[in-house]
Amino acid sequence: MIEMKDVHKTYPNGVMALDGVNLSIKPGEFVYIVGPSGAGKSTLTGLMYREEKHTEGQITINGTDLNTLKERHVPYLRRNIGVVYQDFKLLPKLTVYENVAFALEVIEEDPNNVKQRVMEVLDLVKLKNKARQIPDELSGGEQQRVSIARAIVNNPTLMIADEPTGNLDPETSWDIMSIFEEINANGTTVIMATHSKEIVNTIKKRVIAVENGRIVRDESRGEYGYEI
Amino acid sequence: MVESSVMKAGVNTAMKFSTMRRHLREGSKNIYRNGWMTVASVGAVTTTLLLVGVFLALMLNVNEMANNVEEDVEIKVYADRTAEKKDLDKLESKLNDISAVETVTFSSKEQELEELKSSMGEEGQVWEMYNEDNNPLSDAFILKTSDPLDTFTVADEVAEYDYVEKVHYGEGVVERLFGLTKYVRYIGIALIAALVFTAIFLISNTIKLTIMARSKEIGIMKLVGATNGFIRWPFFIEGILLGVLGSLLPIAVVATGYHYLYNNLRDKIQVSFIELIPFNPLVWQVSLIMLAIGAFIGVWGSLMSVRKFLKV
């Protein structure tokens, strides 16, 4: 699913965010990426859907070599990856329904299937009754559920979440986690960068710890391991 | 591994009909989704097009008047009084053969005398002493050139012909007149060009501002996997709509204004060359030009601005 070999990322201002990362994630895995702020977690996940471009090394996602991936093919890479962000990144003027449907319109899905599929995922995240509202009218947890619905609506094989619970209260966070577990149980690979000790230590999964741009720990059923 | 799913998907570039419908729908919806931003863009189009439209109608009329003035210029060729009928016929056919000449009208010395008497009015009585037997005037040909600017060369050429006594075309006055109409046209074209340029600048800037406010949205669309073309299409539609909406009011104002002006002034102006262009061709032409400018600027402004934010 994901292969990284000696991956480096240096920003134009000279800051080195990743300094030789090697990792391999198999289909169907659930992986936490942990580490202190500024350790390189967001850079690491950002490389996977090409929000960032690595400066050295080899990355293969779903069999696609990112070194040879042309700029105009990037949208097609992203369509196979559902991404959930800490700040939700919903389109503010579109309704909940339209936001989720957007991901299907992008892949030119048959309009006859769009409605059914969108309502299906809105049902999964329990937002069917808010389909006609715009993001500003929803709570943070609801907005995050919309963005999850958008991420999974076209059945991606990989879901990446960058601190999805960072802006949410604990109770809402557990709701989000149960959705993630359900998605993972259906076969989707889930990669989640997080600061939440409670979540990592309660829902035990593979943990990859990043510090100073390097992987310092990789355990199949790990602990959070930081005191914050 | 060589041919991944990404590569295969990339080959499919033909747009589905349903996707085109989606772009049309989204482009139109954006008009009201963006509320005040739309009002600002449409307002900019409206104000500038109003200026362009009014000025265009004015300049087309001034140009038409300049044409009329030029059309009125004619060359009068006075025949030698010793010329007989066959000599005059020969001269007439020779005049007809000049390629730059459009019409040749014969005016006998009797007609000339009548015209002279009537044009002098009261003072024309002096001429009453002349009649058919002692008419001191000559037979004449009145020439009109197809291009008024050929007047000078034709007059010079005809003066050399046999049986031509003298040639008259209002020398001096005509040269100055043509100089004047030329400047009027140049100034008109320059002013319209300046106005259109200002319009393009102002409108595209306003649209740029409204799209700048949406740069974040464009970034999100890209992250969800939208291609640049997919993002661009609704903006293209929206640009056309902004331009068309913005040109509606100017078109209405110019049409009703000109209708009113034309009906009120037509009968009051007695000077022959001051004649307004009828409502029917003029208003359609000006409206079409305004609509085209509006749509063009709308699309251009939208696409130029989106282009900047697509590099996410």
Image (spheres, coloured by chain):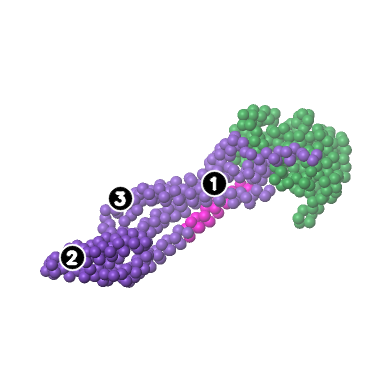
Chain colours: A green, B purple
* Residue annotated with mark 1: B239
Q: Disc 2 marks which amino acid?
A: Leu
Q: Report the front residue among A93 and A59.
A: A59
Q: Label 1 sits on what residue type?
A: Gly
Tell me whether marks 1 and 2 sit on the same chain. yes
Distance, label 1 to label 2, CA atoms, is: 67 Å
The answer to whether residue B210 is magenta is yes
Query: Which residue is disc 2 drawn over?
Result: B113
Q: Is residue B49 above or below residue A165?
A: below
Instruction: Give the side of residue A108 with respect to residue A27, left or right.
Output: left
Mark 3 and mark 1: span between their CA atoms?
36 Å
Q: Which residues are magenta?
A: B194-215
Above or below, comparing residue B295 to residue B181 in the picture: above
How many numbered markers are drawn?
A: 3
Q: Give percent across and percent down for residue A182.
A: 76, 29
Q: Quadrant of the N terminus of chain A?
A: top right
